[in-house]
Amino acid sequence: GKTVVVVGAGMAGVQTAVALREQGWAGRILLLGAERHQPYDRPPLSKAVLLGKAEGSAFEVDFASLGIDLRLSCEVTGLRAGEHVLDTTAGPVPYDVLVIATGADPVALPGSEGVPGVHLLRTLDDAERLRPVLTEQHEIVAVGAGWIGAEFATAAREAGCRVTVVEAADRPLAGALPAEVAAHMARWYTDAGARLLTGARVAAIEPGAVVLDDGTRLPAGAVVVGIGARPATQWLVGSGIELAEDRSVAADERLRSSLPDVYAVGDCASFPSARYGVRLLVHHWDNAVQGPRTVAGNIVHGPAEGPVYDPVPYFWSEQFGRFVQYAGHHDDATDELLWRGDPRSTAWTVCWLRDGVLVALLAVGRPRDLAQGRKLIERGAVLDRARAADASVPLKAA
Ligand code: FAD
């Protein structure tokens, strides 16, 4: 029989292996992961695992009974596509079909690599190193007010630490949300007792302090850097595979790469969205769960009958006691904002409309809006503006 080799044993890799069996793949499945831990879920790392409320977050998958050959502590270092061979730290591995699911690497703050007391938050090892830092009640500086920075600050406050969040942009989540929306989230930091410094750049990290470019010295028992993540595709450079400018594997609408018999999925892959008319690189959990079904379907049934991937992206975040959910994809420059509820209150939603059609929504403490809105986005529904602005009635198509 044929062998599918999956590189990367995170959510996307594990789900691909499982979906292959679910969809009837009878050949061999080899799942290679660089980490030494049993495959685990990442979202709890900045939440329950960080606070010590959960020991770990290993997936409940019985690899042996599914006939999935899982090899841990095995890093793939290169791809020789012409020969259908991978190079790994455990020697060469041949494949018939290859699935690249190597996820993303966190971006380090320049000059901070290897400096004691500076942490990233991507892996279980990172979370385990940070846990005692929180219990020791250090004064902590977090760099970056994105999703990870906000969740980390939430956990650190809950653990009783003093936290200052340093953000280069003029607001939190500047890469994801427009100023009108993110302005309300800045208040969440202060309300939780964290300090948020916007428009602030780190000039240097010294033992026990972070120095900003305006000369401010922030005492720091520990520094946590959350300034983004990049597709972990360095090992593919020179292999002939097409990478996009953002370093993602440039996949097609069936998640096939530019090389024959090679697919890519999850945080490492971008794909063309017919729904939104742009190439999307999604760094969220739902994409690492849905994408694998498309990959498995195409491997098992062949591209003529295999499914096309065109999801409505979805993610959630738990920050400062709030449940934040987003579905869709919006364009700040062109889409119209429509508020549902008062953003100064604890529960509100904001919708993005394009020619009256709902294309995205952000729901804070309003999971029903999210569920209803997600379906409307999928259908390309036109919203009745006046009705949609009334938070007391369910979201419905016009
Ligand atoms: P990864 O999870 O990064 O897995 C890739 C795996 O491949 C890794 O284990 C890596 O070691 C391995 N690998 C890499 N290179 C190689 C190689 N060369 N050889 C072998 N193995 C390799 N999303 C949400 O929607 N909501 C949340 O609340 C949320 N919280 C998060 C909190 C944290 C702390 C983090 C880090 C992420 C969070 N996410 C959240 C994002 C979500 O976890 C990711 O989108 C998801 O993990 C992507 O899965 P993946 O399998 O594509 O990549």
Image: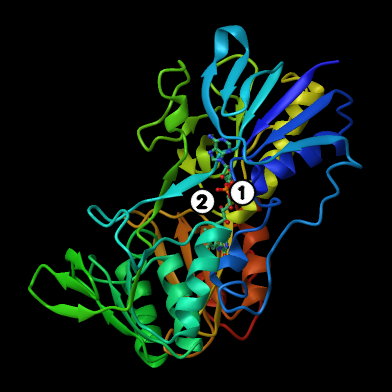
Alpha carbon of mark 1 to alpha carbon of mark 2: how far?
7 Å
Which residue is at the front of the view, 95 or 171?
95
**Dot 2 beta carbon under 8 Å from ligand 1:** yes
Which residue is at the front of the view, 341 or 97?
97
Residue lying farthest top?
Answer: 82
Which residue is at the front of the view, 74 or 245?
74
Side (left or right) of 396 relative to 226 = right
- Where residue 148 sits in the image (x, y, percent)? 45, 66
Residue occupying the point 62% across, 67% down:
44
Q: Is residue 49 above or below residue 25?
A: below
Task: Tell me the crowding category of disc 2: few under 14, some 14 to 19, or many 20 or more residues within 10 angstroms, Cα based.
Answer: many
Image quarter for residue 225?
bottom left
Q: Are marks 1 and 2 in contact (CB under 8 Å)?
A: yes
SS at circle 1 = helix
Q: Amino acid at mark 1?
A: Asn
Task: Tell me the crowding category of disc 1: few under 14, some 14 to 19, or many 20 or more residues within 10 angstroms, Cα based.
Answer: many
Q: Which residue is mark 1?
A: 287
Residue 398, visible in the rendered structure: no
For residue 180, the mark is none
Q: Which residue is mark 2?
A: 283
Residue occupying the point 45% across, 41% down:
231
- Where residue 364 sits in the image (x, y, percent)? 53, 78
- Where residue 396 sits in the image (x, y, percent)? 65, 69
**Dot 1 beta carbon under 8 Å from ligand 1:** yes
Q: Amino acid at mark 2?
A: His
Side (left or right) of 252 relative to 379 = left
Q: Is residue 176 above or below residue 346?
A: above
Residue occupying the point 82% across, 51% down:
61
Image quarter for residue 144?
bottom left
Residue occupying the point 38% across, 84% down:
138
